[in-house]
Image (tube, helix red, strand yellow):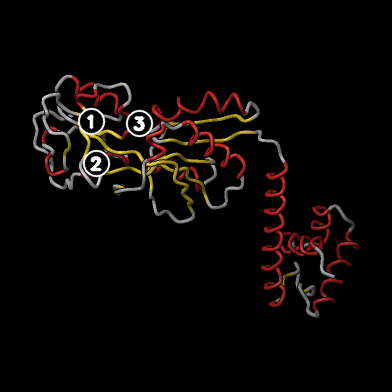
């Protein structure tokens, strides 16, 4: 019967190409290594290595067998990691990337209860834009992202958390109960600087392609700055629902049907294995959300 141990031996030998070095890496004697590989060749009925060459080299059959062996060993490692994840107590580091237009409004809702309930988890959060989060998820520098979706990124999995409405934040003199994108005075519209996905969503919502004409230009990376400018009657802006908490409700105008929303999701690489931590974070955030956000449906999700 072919064993995982034999698979490991032939892979190591294919990397070292010398029996002595391979046996040292496998912590066995050279005769033992040679015997185990010879036994595998006999079971398969083919030569895996051409021993006449110096250094030795895989045969054509050997190259195909090595491909299977490497895949088997990789699956074995993944299996052990998955089992370990299922067995272990929730502990260790959980690295989270969250976009700036969500972070200051969402994190305070759940972080205190989360850290209290799970004291053995180290939550390491950083506030960065969408493209950086995706890059860091792909290269393993982050575990989870919290950002606006859909992204349609290869090898990235999205788990929707909630849908939040967009609102116009403007003058108290505005006398309409609802507003449509076509009603917005684009020359008064204050936008976030480029690189923010919320900026892209606002541009798509307003079907804005032409350059704005105004004698006041301000590049900001902060929704809070835009809110303060609106309160000083320096323009209007569009805010996601969580960002409207604690501001002058007389300045908030709801969009007409279909009401535009942004989808906010937990995002992970498809190879992510800390499923218990992911489930825990998802549950704690969902439980912390205001009732209205929990009830919001997908409606009209604005593209990024």
**In the rendered image of this protein, does residue 4 appear above or below residue 215?**
below
Of the image marks 1 and 3, the number of the one nearer the N terminus: 1
Of the image marks 2 and 1, the number of the one nearer the N terminus: 2
Which residue is drawn at the image coordinates 31% and 21% (left, top)? 246
Residue 170 % position (x, y) = 17, 28
The residue where tag 1 is placed is 219
Select label 1 or label 3 by which is in front: 3
Question: Residue 202 shows which numbered tag?
Answer: 2
Q: CA distance from mark 2 to mark 1?
A: 15 Å
* Secondary structure found at label 2: helix
Select label 2 or label 3 by which is in front: 3
Residue 101 % position (x, y) = 35, 33
Q: Where's the N terminus, which quadrant?
A: bottom right
* Secondary structure found at label 1: loop
* Secondary structure found at label 3: helix
The answer to whether marks 2 and 1 mark residues whose Cβ atoms lie closer than 8 Å is no
The residue where tag 3 is placed is 242
Dot 2 crowding, Cα within 10 Å, few <14, some 14–19, many 20+: many
**In the rendered image of this protein, does residue 287 appear above or below residue 156?**
above
């Amino acid at each position: 019967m072919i064993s995982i141990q034999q698979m490991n031996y032939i892979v190591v030998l294919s990397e070292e190409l010398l029996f002595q070095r391979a046996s040292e890496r496998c912590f066995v004697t050279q005769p033992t290594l040679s015997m185990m590989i010879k036994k595998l060749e006999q079971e398969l009925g083919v030569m895996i290595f051409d021993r006449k060459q110096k250094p030795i080299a895989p045969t054509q059959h050997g190259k195909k067998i090595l491909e299977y062996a490497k895949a088997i060993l990789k699956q074995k490692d993944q299996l052990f990691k998955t089992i370990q994840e299922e067995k272990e107590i929730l502990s260790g580091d959980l690295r989270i990337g969250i976009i700036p237009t969500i972070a200051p409004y969402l994190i305070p809702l759940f972080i205190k209860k989360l850290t209290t309930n799970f004291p053995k988890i180290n939550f390491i959060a950083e506030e960065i834009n969408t493209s950086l989060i995706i890059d860091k998820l792909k290269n393993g520098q982050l575990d989870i992202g919290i950002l606006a979706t859909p992204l349609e990124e290869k090898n990235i999995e999205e788990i929707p958390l909630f849908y939040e409405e967009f609102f116009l934040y403007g003058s108290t003199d505005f006398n309409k109960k609802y507003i449509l994108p076509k009603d917005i005075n684009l020359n008064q519209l204050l936008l976030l600087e480029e690189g923010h996905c919320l900026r892209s969503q606002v541009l798509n919502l307003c079907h804005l392609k032409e350059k704005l004409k105004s004698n006041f230009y301000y590049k900001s990376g902060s929704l809070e700055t835009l809110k303060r400018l609106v309160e000083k009657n320096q323009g209007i802006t569009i805010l996601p629902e969580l960002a409207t908490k604690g501001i002058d409700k007389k300045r908030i105008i709801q969009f007409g049907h279909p009401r535009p929303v942004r989808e906010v999701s937990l995002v992970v690489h498809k190879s992510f294995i800390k499923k218990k931590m992911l489930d825990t974070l998802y549950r704690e955030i969902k439980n912390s959300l205001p009732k209205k956000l929990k009830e919001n449906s997908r409606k009209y999700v604005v593209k990024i």
